[in-house]
Image (cartoon, rainbow, N blue to C red):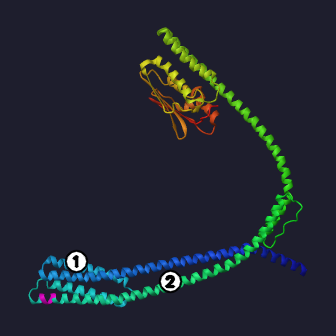
Amino acid sequence: MPELMDEKGKERAQTILKKSLLNRFGLYIAILLGAFLVSFIAMYGGIRKLDQAQKQFMERILEEEKVDDGLEELQNLFGIYRNSWSEESLLDYQKACGRLEENLDSYSRYAADSQDTLDYIRRLRGFIDYQSGLLQEHSSASGRDLYDLASYISTSISVHQNAVKDMAQIDLQHARDVYEAETSLVSRRVTVTIVLSMAFMAVFGLWSIRAFFFVRNAMGTINHHLRELASCNWGMSDLTINDYLEFDRLSHTLNMMKHQIREYVVRTERDSMLAVQLQEERLINEQQRAELIEAQMATLRAQVNPHFLFNALNMIGSAALLDSPERVMQLVEATGKILRYSLYTKENMVLLDEEAEIVQQYLFLQKHRYGDALQIDIRNCLEGEELMIPPMSIQPIVENCFKHGFGGKNEFKVGISICIRDGRIVIEVTDNGVGFDTAAVKNSGGIGLSNIEKRLKLQYGQEEEYLFMESRSGFTKITLKIPIKEDVQ
């Protein structure tokens, strides 16, 4: 029983030893980062404190200079008042006294740590108040009394000017002593912090060197083992590096890899055969899907032809009764081009220019029918570009303008715009007809717009919308947004 306890103790000791690499590394990193953080905070705080002390020292000097300048201003303004004894010069002098008191208030905030300076500020402020009171009391005096008062104030100002200079030297020396003491304290704190940080860095560096040599030797052994595996040497002995938990797990993983690699090769060969079979089945499914799409496209195209042919024959019949044979021949040729395009175009994609030509032929027929009552505006920014769209995409939309939009109007306008916007071919067909209920058209499942929408989804996918309708009385706009395909199929 004691032997069993000893074995368990040894296992626990080994486990602790195996975990010590990461544990110690994490501990040293945490201590090092903490030392760096403390050093940074100490240095940053020290610099901020020194900057603040320096700023206060400079501002203290400036405030003292303002007091000195204020006394000089009092001396000058009082001299002016003494020469003129005017109310205006007295008012300027009193304003200067007010400014000097404000400067004394500001200076007292910076000199709060010097009792001597504060005492002098109180004396100077008392003199200002006292002499202001004297001037108010003797404002109407004259002769000898006024002369004596002026002499007293002028002499007192001169005395205070000299006293300010003496006070400034004493106060600035006191402020300099405070600044130097603060600088010395901050420097000592920063120095101690940096020394401690360097000590932590030295300990971490020594431990890192020791850990580096161990890791280098261990990685050399692992690299040799991997080279043997790359040479398909399956008979080599298992890898044993179990001083630390990380390398013990890595050794176990490499040994498992060696024992399972043959099984993996066999499984990979079997999976490759299955992948080839799956690819063949996928190609067959893609071919069947393409054939299905082609059959659906042919069916949808066939729905368009009878509708257009009925309208075209009615138009040609009417023209045969009213127009010349040459005109009838032109109408027949235009109708033939449209029928030939719709009947014999078997490709899923055609050039945009071919579709635009068919639309122009159709509008030629309608222009003959309605004459000046029909106004046509075509703006094709993509003429000459080799861009592909599904056939019979625009013509049915234009045909719907005449079928549902004319409504007995005296003037009928049809506009066609073709451009590229946001990486798509944007086709907009507008008219000024009576309009229609867009929701009813979407749910009707008719031949026209529904046909186009189905064909676009078959060609480009069911996830997005390609046809957009906007209609009200006097304005209808049908918009197609077709992805760009430049290759001819």
Left or right? Give the position of 331 relative to 239: left
Instruction: Tell me the amino acid under the disc marked 2.
Output: Val
Q: Local crowd at mark 2 within 10 Å, few (<14), some, or many (≥20)?
A: some
User: Residue 468 in the image: x percent, y percent?
Assistant: 54, 35
Label 1 secondary element: helix
Determine whether, in the image, residue 157 is placed left or right of residue 115: left
In the rendered image, the quadrant that contains the N terminus is bottom right
Q: Is residue 15 above or below residue 273?
A: below
Q: Main secondary structure of the magenta part?
A: helix
Please name the residue that numbered disc 1 is placed on. Answer: 95
For the question of whether residue 454 can be seen, the reply is no
Query: Label 1: how many residues lie within 10 Å, few (<14), some (14-19) or many (20+)?
Result: few
Region of the chain picked out in magenta, as a range: 146-150
N-term-proximal mark, 1 vs 2: 1
Give the residue drawn at x 24%, y 85%.
Answer: 128
Closest to the camera, between mark 1 and mark 2, is 2
Q: Is any part of residue 223 visible from this angle? A: yes
Helix, strand or loop under label 2? helix
Q: Nearer the viewer, residue 123 or 247?
A: 247
| CB-based contact (under 8 Å), mark 1 and mark 2 | no
Q: Position of residue 182 (x, y in %)?
A: 46, 85
Task: Measuring from the top left, give residue 50's x and y in whole percent.
Answer: 46, 80
- In the rendered image of this protein, does residue 438 appear above or below residue 232? above
Q: Amino acid at mark 1?
A: Lys
Q: Nearer the viewer, residue 180 or 392?
A: 180
The residue at which mark 2 appears reads as 186
- Relative side of 267 to 372, left or right: right
Which quadrant: the C terminus?
Answer: top right
Residue drawn at the location 70% of the way across and 74% of the way down: 25
**Is 354 covered by the magenta stretch?**
no
Asked if 418 appears above or below 371 in the picture, the reply is below
Q: Nearer the viewer, residue 341 or 85?
A: 341
